[in-house]
Amino acid sequence: MALEIEHKFLVKSDEWKSSVVSETPIEQGYLTTGSGLTVRVRLKGARAFLTIKGPSDGSQRSEFEYPIPTEDAKAMLALEGASGRIAKTRFQVRSGSHTWDLDVFAGDNAGLVMAEVELGAQDEAFDRPSWAGQEVTEDPRYFNSYLAERPYRTW
């Protein structure tokens, strides 16, 4: 079973910009978000993915991700019943021995900037960069599936 272990933080400054490794536009939507299970369709640059995530248990949860044809992803995002979409730009940012994913949200979630670091084990140590503010790992308001239905701009 694939296991995702990550910590999420709000970003409090632009200091990260000097350490950007790459930049990718992302558009995603959700086919289901019930009972802690989410099924996500993501367009990431020129590639597309279907991702199934289990319920969160602190900073970890099961995650299964599969590449799919881009045209299939677009068709799935257009399905009746698919929940709201999220648009963001993902920057990969090097800090210490880790590469962080830093998301700058657009559209109804504009103004929100979050960073996450993915770990190989629950007890893996990581250096928290100066631009990483409040940890929001366990706050469901900052789950992308929540933001798709209740955008940041409406809080």
Image (cartoon, helix red, strand yellow):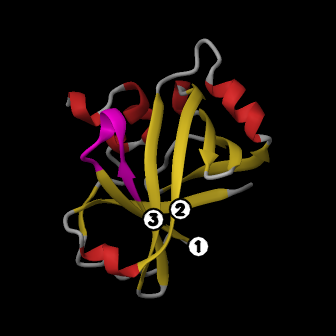
36 vs 40, nearest the viewer: 40
Any part of residue 128 in sight: no
**Highlighted magenta segment, given as a residue range:** 103-112
Tell me the amino acid under the disc marked 1.
Gly
Question: Residue 131 in the image: x percent, y percent?
Answer: 24, 72
Q: Residue at x 56, y 30 (%)?
A: 30
Foreground tag (3 vs 2): 3
Give the image location of residue 92, x and y in percent.
48, 69
Provide the residue designation for mark 3. Answer: 91
In contact (CB < 8 Å): disc 2 and disc 1:
yes
**The residue under label 3 is which amino acid type?**
Phe
Residue drawn at x 70%, y 34% is: 73
Residue 111 highlighted magenta (yes or no): yes
Residue 140's label in the rendered image is: none
With 9 as the anchor, is 65 left or right in this view?
A: right
Q: Would you say 35 lies left or right of 131 here?
A: right
- On residue 120, the disc is 1
What residue is shown at x 44% (from left), y 53% (from top)? 89
